[in-house]
Image (spheres, coloured by chain):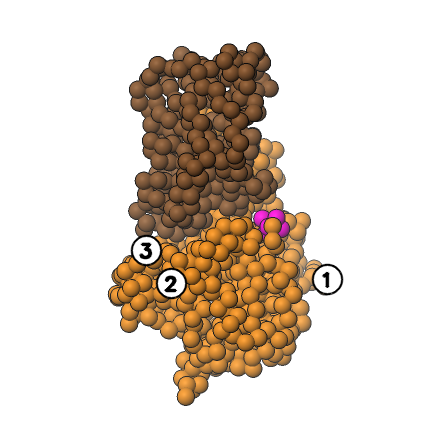
């Protein structure tokens, strides 16, 4: 299921200029950025990163699938997996995450795994038309990175990776306002919750049975996933690799 | 030839016996009814058998002890009954936990014994439900506390009912051992590290055609209209006898309204009907208390509190391995058992107590053996407390509801870390220099699962050549390590083989051989004469 989070691949649209979108630091604790995802020039979907206080969510509005991290207590993170079509939510306690061997890296979660990688890239100039952003580039684990990093938002406005002829591009194109973010989180609170620990005993629930048999915890370090569902780790895997 | 070997071993054994081989530890001195017994040596670390003759003498002594173990098997000889249930605690879990506990104590581990493995009577329990070869916790616990098998998902209603069909269960409610005990004037208690509304504890006090109907928000509107009640409400509205004396576990959010914030996490409760069942508990019962953290729990005066409700998490309690890290603090299973007995023992009519280690099951479902084993050890600690606090007039059963597809593989040498990679013996029978390997030269762990989330280690790049990760690069003994699984599934599954039941106290010998799970109710009912006592107590 994690693989399918961001697999809404479709057509390529012409990419906007890197600096055509240059948001200011939001005055509120609830905001988000929307990204257009492209794979080898083909538009592959949309992804949102949403901030709500100390919470961070990654949400695919096309597929209505999301991952919601509760990070108020950094030593005891909690996690929710969101399924909008079914109005269902799977809740993971800290103990569940530990039992699954999930190592939570908050910097990675809050930045599409980019923040820990910046120190491995070469810092360039401020981005034209967007002085709040700075350009970074370089090679990590055989992947070439081009990044426009917004230091105040601590997020990339542009993230492009090239590896083995594959070009993947994430382009921020809209700031999501506070009412929209609050509406999203409020909606998710109303989803029917199921404790992850209970799923193994709920095989007669058709929705959960599908998760059990198809698998929905496939990685030991889930943070964010690219358009092929490949985990984006803090180890320079943005270009992905085969499974 | 065989006779010569036997005689030789016997001769050596006798000579060594004179040189002072230690006792392996057995029962302590039981207390008189109503008073604590003297701490015993059950479960004390076993010896490290390094002399061949000590095998012989120790086994001989064990047989001698067994031949002299006599319990009063008269119906009604048991004043009290304690039923311990390790959820998902199959026999391989017992073996691995036994070894782990021994190794944590610095022993080799294999000859160690969990506290209840000192019990004199053991049986093999058939766990199938009335409609499934491999069951879930609802029909299995129903079988244990009502005396009949039912279908998966049903909580203490007969298999004439249809899952999730409210009206089909009406008139099919089964009387449980806890209800009988209350009717007989006994005190009763329920303890679980899972939610108190979870299938195993729920089966003792509630009737439901769906194990998931734990709060009213989990129920379809039609079921409520048709007169079915959620499980949490049934705990508070329980009407048998003078009500349940002790209920300790998790599931706080199922007892509080969705307009009320949790005191520990700030999340909302799950009840839509506006009922605050924690407040109703203290208003319903005099001399009652509600607690939600360990400090409050330890401050309860067990000599004056008659009805105690403790809800220590919004959902399940922490795994034992994580308990010390809990923000608000949670009592251990042993602490809950100990203080519950302090309350229950004040009743001269006796008591019925059910204690569940509910998270063994969850850790197995996650494919995380270490947490499952630590929770099993925590259950062993709780049983040890019960052994020491309960009198000789108490029947104690320790069993599981079902097993898991959890395996102990390979040919590891004696004392090999149970959570570690398999290191076998060399041609001389000594520990080999390196690890045992598979057909592709890769090491493997002793513990593993037949299915579950541990298949392939996801995107790990080391999983390319032989479809297995190179475990040399992992800390496989880490508490967080997820064991490999053969079949990829999002959640590891239950298993259908028999589980064990261990018994001590009056009626214990009724547990023997291969027995049906629902026979355990009849063992308890006969030992404590529950039905006759309940009938006699009716006006």
Which label number is shown at residue B230? 2
Q: Within 10 angstroms of label 3, few (less than 14), some, or many (20 or more) residues?
A: few
Q: Residue at x 55, y 66 (%)?
A: B290
Which residue appears at 53% of the width and 66% of the height?
B309
Q: Which of the two discs, 2 and 1, labels the residue nearer the N terminus?
A: 1
Figure quadrant of residue A173: top left
Answer whether residue A154 is visible to the viewer in this image: yes
- Tag 3 secondary structure: loop
Q: Chain of mark 1?
A: B
The secondary element bearing badge 1 is classed as loop
Q: Is residue B334 part of the magenta span, yes or no?
A: no
* Residue to which mark 3 is pinned: B133
Crowd band around label 2 with a 10 angstrom C-alpha radius: few (<14), some (14–19), many (20+):
many
In the image, B274 versus B147, the foreground residue is: B274
Q: Residue at x 37, y 54 (%)?
A: B496
Above-or-below relation of B6 to B368: below
User: Where's residue A223, x and y in %?
Assistant: 48, 32
Evaluate if marks 3 and 1 touch, with contact meaning CB atoms under 8 Å apart.
no
Q: Find chain A in the image and tell me its colour.
A: brown
Chain B's shade in the image? orange
Which SS class for mark 2?
A: loop
Secondary structure, magenta segment, majority class? helix
Q: Residue at x 34, y 20 (%)?
A: A43
Residue at mark 2: chain: B
User: Residue B34 or A197: which is nearer the viewer?
Assistant: A197
Residue B61 visible in the displayed image: no
Q: CA distance from mark 3 to mark 1?
A: 50 Å
In this view, the residue in front, B361 or B508, is B361
């Amino acid at each position: 299921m994690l693989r399918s989070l961001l697999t809404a691949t479709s057509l390529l649209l012409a990419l906007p200029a890197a600096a055509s979108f240059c948001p200011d630091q939001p005055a509120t604790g609830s905001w988000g950025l929307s990204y257009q995802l492209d794979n080898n020039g083909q538009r592959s979907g949309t992804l949102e990163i949403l901030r709500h206080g100390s919470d961070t969510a990654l949400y695919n509005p096309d597929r209505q699938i999301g991952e919601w991290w509760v990070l108020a207590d950094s030593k005891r993170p909690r996690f929710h997996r969101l399924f909008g079509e079914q109005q269902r939510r799977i809740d993971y306690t800290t103990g569940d995450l530990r039992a699954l061997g999930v190592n939570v890296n908050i910097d990675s979660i809050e930045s599409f795994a980019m923040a820990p990688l910046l120190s491995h890239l070469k810092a360039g100039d401020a981005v034209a038309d967007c002085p709040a952003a700075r350009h970074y580039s370089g090679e990590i684990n055989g992947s070439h990175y081009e990044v426009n990093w917004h230091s105040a938002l601590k997020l990339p406005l542009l993230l492009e990776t090239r590896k083995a002829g594959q070009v993947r591009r994430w382009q921020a194109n809209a700031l999501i306002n506070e009412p929209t973010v609050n509406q999203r989180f409020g909606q998710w609170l109303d989803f029917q919750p199921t404790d992850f620990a209970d799923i193994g005993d709920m095989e007669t629930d058709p929705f959960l049975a599908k998760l059990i048999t198809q698998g929905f915890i496939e990685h030991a370090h889930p943070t964010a996933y690219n358009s092929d569902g490949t985990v984006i780790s803090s180890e320079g895997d943005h270009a992905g690799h085969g499974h | 030839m065989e006779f010569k070997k036997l005689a030789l071993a016997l001769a050596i054994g006798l000579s060594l016996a004179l040189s002072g081989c230690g006792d392996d530890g057995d029962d302590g001195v039981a207390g008189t009814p109503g008073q604590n017994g003297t701490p015993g040596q059950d479960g004390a670390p076993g010896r490290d058998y390094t002399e061949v003759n000590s095998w012989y003498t120790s086994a001989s002594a064990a047989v001698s002890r067994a031949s002299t173990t006599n319990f009063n098997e008269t119906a009604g000889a048991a004043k009290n009954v304690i039923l311990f249930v390790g959820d998902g605690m199959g026999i391989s879990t017992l073996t691995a936990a036994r070894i782990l506990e021994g190794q944590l104590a610095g022993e080799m581990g294999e000859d160690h014994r969990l506290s209840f493995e000192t019990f004199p009577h053991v049986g093999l329990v058939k766990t199938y439900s009335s409609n499934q070869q491999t069951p879930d916790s609802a029909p299995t616990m129903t079988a244990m506390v009502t005396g009949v098998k039912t279908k998966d998902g049903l909580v203490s209603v007969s298999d004439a009912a249809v899952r999730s069909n409210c009206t089909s269960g009406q008139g099919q409610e089964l009387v449980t051992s806890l209800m009988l005990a209350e009717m007989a004037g006994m005190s009763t208690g329920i303890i679980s590290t899972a939610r108190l509304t979870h299938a195993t504890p729920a089966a003792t006090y509630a009737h439901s055609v769906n194990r998931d109907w734990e709060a009213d928000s989990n129920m379809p509107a039609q079921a409520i209209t048709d007169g079915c009640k959620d499980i949490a409400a049934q705990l508070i509205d329980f009407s048998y006898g003078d009500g349940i004396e002790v209920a300790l576990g998790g599931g706080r959010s199922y007892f509080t309204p969705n307009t009320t914030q949790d005191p520990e996490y700030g999340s909302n409760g799950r009840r839509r009907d506006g009922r605050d069942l924690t407040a109703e508990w203290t208003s319903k019962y005099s001399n009652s208390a509600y607690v939600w953290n360990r400090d409050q729990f330890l401050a309860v005066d067990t000599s004056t509190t008659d009805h105690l409700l403790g809800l220590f998490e919004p959902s399940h309690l922490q795994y034992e391995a994580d308990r010390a890290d809990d923000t608000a603090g949670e009592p251990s299973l042993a602490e809950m058992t100990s203080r519950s007995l302090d309350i229950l023992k004040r009743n001269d009519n006796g008591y019925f107590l059910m204690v569940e280690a509910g998270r063994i099951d969850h850790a197995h479902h996650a494919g995380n053996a270490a947490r499952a084993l630590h929770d099993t050890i925590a259950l062993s600690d709780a049983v040890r407390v019960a052994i020491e606090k309960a009198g000789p007039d108490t029947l104690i059963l320790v069993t599981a509801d079902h097993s898991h597809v959890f395996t102990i593989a390979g040919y590891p040498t004696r004392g090999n870390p149970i959570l570690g990679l398999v290191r076998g013996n060399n041609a001389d029978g000594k520990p080999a220099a390196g690890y045992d390997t598979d057909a592709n030269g890769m090491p493997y762990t002793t513990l593993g699962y037949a299915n579950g989330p541990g298949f392939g280690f996801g995107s790990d790049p080391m999983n390319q050549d032989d479809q297995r990760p190179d475990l040399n690069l992992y800390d496989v003994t880490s508490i967080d390590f997820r064991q490999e699984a053969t079949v990829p599934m999002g959640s590891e599954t239950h298993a259908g083989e028999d589980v064990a039941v261990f018994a001590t106290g009056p009626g214990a010998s009724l547990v023997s051989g291969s027995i049906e799970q629902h026979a355990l109710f009849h063992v308890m009912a006969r030992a404590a004469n529950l039905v006759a006592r309940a009938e006699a107590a009716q006006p």
